[in-house]
Amino acid sequence: MRKRTVALIVVAAVLLAVVGGLYWAGRHLFFEPTAKGVDSVVDELGGERVLGVFAHPDDEQTVNGLFWHAHEGGAYTAMITATQGEAGHQTPVVARQEDLGEVRKAEALKNSFNLGVDRHVVWDYPDGGVPDVDEDELVDRVADEMRRVKPDVVVAFWPESGATGHEDHMRMGEVAELAIAQLEEEGGAYAGPKHLVYTISPSGALAAFGGETGAFVVANQPKPEYAMDAAVQKKHEGWTIHASQANYLPESYLLPTWLVYLLWDQEFYHVRDLEAEPLG
């Protein structure tokens, strides 16, 4: 009996060691060695007003932590979503496809409310067709929203990678930069934000699970300077709210959502100081 007990203890210890090793190996894929850990990127930058410039409903899922902690810190937060996501793939199917744009717009507004966002505009540019929209129109419209919100921090996609390789993401990242450059050149009462913050995807995980798209993103995004708490509970709540996209992570990356966020509990950001390095 005693030998059996010892054997069970040994087996349990081996299993724990294996599970622990796999866990830490997995976490390593979601670790960025260049990133300094901070409680809040917005607080670290002294931000008081934040504007996110995005392409689709659910894009805000990449920045839950930043917006939630900015809200908790007393900042005014706002978002632009350029499309209603009407061309998206439902996973699972929750509505008629012809109604998907209205459904996803509602999901985005509900999720931003859950993150404490004060203002959220959802436009109706074509999902998948943002690069074809007249550039001047897009830039002017984003610049107008910046004048209205007067953010000192703008959050956007890195134009060369778009966080996921989506052309709409890349285009909106570029448009955010062009709108800021326009404001800087005009030099009006509001001359643009002090910082432009780019959301950066974890390179190790993308290289391991992202296929060709992941490799593209890794090759075309900068190293992040900051890491912060991802507000994982808000991410889980967000996928419940985004019911039409609730299975996005397991379908895209072959891992269950709970496991992804057990490993990926930080957000990563690259920051451009626009006072030291203006875009205009």
Image (cartoon, rainbow, N blue to C red):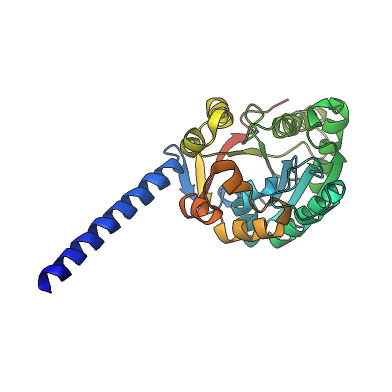
Instruction: Tally the marks.
Output: 0
Q: Is residue 110 above or below residue 150?
A: below
Q: Quadrant of residue 14?
A: bottom left
In the rendered image, residue 136, in percent from the top left (x then y), is placed at 86, 27
Confirm whether residue 272 shows in the render: yes
Q: Nearer the viewer, residue 245 or 178?
A: 245
Q: In this rendering, would 26 be left or right of 228?
A: left
Q: Nearer the viewer, residue 192 or 92?
A: 92
Q: Nearer the viewer, residue 188 or 154?
A: 154
Q: Nearer the viewer, residue 141 or 184?
A: 141
Q: Is residue 40 above or below residue 164?
A: below
The quarter of the rendered structure image containing the N terminus is bottom left
Q: Quadrant of residue 139?
A: top right
Q: Which residue is located at x 84 percent, y 32 percent?
A: 138
In the rendered image, residue 101, in percent from the top left (x then y), is placed at 84, 47
Confirm whether residue 45 shows in the render: no
In the rendered image, residue 25, in percent from the top left (x then y), is placed at 37, 45
The quarter of the rendered structure image containing the C terminus is top right
Q: In this rendering, would 99 be left or right of 194?
A: right
In the rendered image, residue 72, in percent from the top left (x then y), is placed at 63, 62
